[in-house]
Amino acid sequence: MYAIAGLLVLVTALSAIESNEWWIRIWDFPRVQILVGLAVAAIAIGWIGRRWRWPALGLLALAAAWQVYRILPYTPFASREVAFADDAFDAKSCFSVLSLNVYQYNTDYARTIALIDREDPDILLLLETGSKWAVALEPVLRRYPHRVDRPLDNTYGLMFATRLPMTKGRIGAIIEKETPSVFASLTTRGGTPFNYIGLHPRPPLPGQDTEARDAEIAIAAGRARAMKYPVLAGGDFNDVAWSHTSQLFKRIGGYLDPRIGRGTYPTFPAGYPGFRWPLDHLFFTPEFRVRSLGVGASIGSDHLPVTAVLCLGDTVPDAPAPKVSTEDRKDAREILNEYRETDTH
């Protein structure tokens, strides 16, 4: 048990190190699971431990305190960052959103089609859509008056569709041509304009550190801050909500996170309910309110779908946009410089 406790303390300490190395950054992900493991180890050592009991319990307590500090905002014990939409928002001010990483090698197309039919979203973002997915989804996506698609067989294809008025829509590369993003200028049925950004950067993996992912997220955040209208951003960021990069994305982009004060809303891996992390996100600027937010049931992908009903009108924002500090700007510059130093494209 002491060995397990030591390992849990070690990976907690690794997660506190600022580094782009994949084997360090990966420990940002399972904070909830590590916290549970720390609690179990503390109970076991407190019950059966003899030698080194108190030093071990002290280290476990410090590690647990760090994990709680990082994930506490994403629990009902914290104050909500985004207010519920009240009756001041009429039906024309509100719209539904569905975002899903379909998993390119998932061939159960019917379940995703049934999900789209059931949710009938006003805004739909589908990720990892290869050429076979494009063919399978064409009949259902044909119903949408506005679409921008780029099917790719490298697990970074995407398809965006909306029935809201769209004045501009394009798919472009923020960092790498092989990992495109979507940008759209939309309008609610009530006539309020806003911008949409859909992202799917690469994850930290052996041989693939986080420079490109972090740079893509930082650049997207900077673009959002410069936009004239409110911004909604979503997708599979391959990063958890409580990571340094996600928090930097929030502050630089002026975003709020509807999960704060509500829950973690974990989406990956879909097949392991007790071991999921929140990799699929919805962030938006303070003009938006949330009417509903949820994670759907499994449709055969390794990710779960994210659903929401959001409202946008003429009301005064409930909360101010996060402030960008000098340190944040410095961090963003360092992220971009580190990517340029490692870029081989």
Image: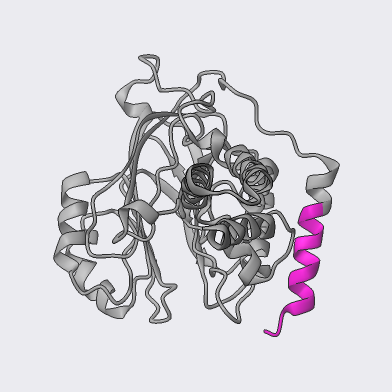
Identify the image quadrant of residue 150: bottom left
Residue pictured at 53% horizontal, 39% vertical: 284
- Whether residue 112 appears in magenta in the rendering, the answer is no
Q: Depth check: 67 or 88 in front?
A: 67
Residue pictured at 55% horizontal, 41% vertical: 71
Image coordinates of residue 294 in percent, x first then y, are 33, 40
Classify the position of the C terminus by image quarter.
Answer: bottom right
First to last magenta residue range: 331-345
Image coordinates of residue 187 in percent, x first then y, are 43, 39
Image coordinates of residue 65 in percent, x first then y, are 63, 39
* Number of marks present in the image shown: 0
Q: Give the farthest residue toward the front.
A: 50
Residue pictured at 39% horizontal, 54% vertical: 276
Residue pictured at 23% horizontal, 50% vertical: 297
Q: Main secondary structure of the magenta part?
A: helix
Name above or below for residue 37 compared with residue 47: below
Q: Is residue 231 toward the left or the right of residue 120 in the image?
A: right
Q: Depth check: 177 or 246 in front?
A: 246
- Whether residue 332 appears in magenta in the rendering, the answer is yes
